Amino acid sequence: MMKKYFILTILITVLLLLSNRAIAWQSCGLTCEYYIDSEGVLTIRGTGEKGCGEVADFSRPWYDKSTRSSIKHIHVEEGITNLGALVFDGLSEVESVSLPTTLKTLGERIFYNTPKITNIVIPSSVESIGANAFSGMFQLQSINIPEGITTINDEIFRLATNLQSINIPASVTSIGSGAFWGASSIQEIVIPENVTFIGSLAFADMGVLRNIDIPDSVTTIEADAFKNVMASDLTCNEQNLERYLNASGGLKEPLKITCTDGNCENVLKGTQWEGKTQIIYPLKKIKQPDGSVAIYEIGKFKGYRNKRIYTIQEAEKLSKKTGNTFKLRYK
């Protein structure tokens, strides 16, 4: 009798626990629900067809003051496809985030002012990230931007002051206004070849940014895009040098310019930097119709924009041999 009573008690306890857990799950959007456990883990799951669910814009029932301060970790289960605007905004005690491979959209200001998060892995499935998504994440040190993202939206990393580096994928064509404004720990920015537009204040107040590579594809650099940047090494063409100077308020210190075309001295004529800036015209290898490769110096030389230099093979035949080297001569 005692044994039966003991087993019955255990069964009732288990059923109560399961019942309580079922009651604890609450709706938080379109076919999705959430649960906060005693360890401060906020879990979100999809409950629709194939588990798909969307946390709609501003849908954050956990946002009352007492609840949000208890959340330490965020875990979004597989099946969630969309996390809307401001969903995790202001969760100031959150330290870690786990996102699913089914995720396609991160809304505006989704992690705005979550200052304790140091690392986020964005799944490769994500196709768009809203403006201000990671703004005010003062402790964020590393993050990836998935290949396929075409726009770095406005102020997306504003005041991410501990972000050490950023890899902008080749798919990006536009960098929005204030995108990296105040991300003051990044020292180098390589802008991909497909980018055509750089918005106002995009890289402003990045105090230690030293190396900047602006591709020839860029046709627009808006006002103050490089305001208060102390670059010492700039790679760009002649037109983008002029755009850079206009967007940075001028050079702040001695600068080395690798000029990929034209004659960058013209841009500096009549300015306080004329004659004080090192300008390098790199050599380029260009395949010839006969299959051979010729070397050209970029920039105007004696009136020519691209001056061909003898290849090593040609130099062997035409230049005076001095030991084991040959002097490369202009044609």
Image (cartoon, rainbow, N blue to C red):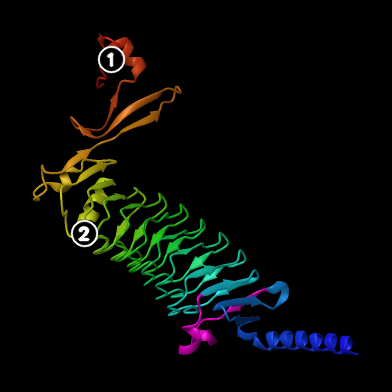
- Numbered badge on residue 248: 2
Q: Magenta span covers which residues?
A: 52-72
Badges 2 and 1: C-beta atoms under 8 Å apart? Answer: no
Give the vertical position of 307 relative to 257 (above or below): above
Left or right: residue 233 compared with residue 148: left
Percent position of residue 195, x then y: 39, 55
Q: Nearer the viewer, residue 35 or 33?
A: 35
Give the vertical position of 310 relative to 72 (above or below): above
Residue 224 in sight here: yes
Q: What element carries label 2?
A: helix
Residue 44 falls in image quadrant: bottom right
Give the vertical position of 196 relative to 37 (above or below): above
Type of amino acid under label 2: Ser
Residue 320 falls in image quadrant: top left
Percent position of residue 103, x then y: 58, 67
- Numbered badge on residue 70: none
Q: Which of marks 1 and 2 precedes in the sequence? A: 2
Q: Nearer the viewer, residue 190 or 24?
A: 24
Residue 206 falls in image quadrant: bottom left
- Numbered badge on residue 326: 1
Q: Which residue is drawn at 23% across and 50% down?
A: 241
Percent position of residue 152, x then y: 42, 63
Packing grade of label 2 (10 A; few <14, some 14-19, many >=20) is many
Left or right: residue 124 compared with residue 188: right
Q: What element carries label 1?
A: strand
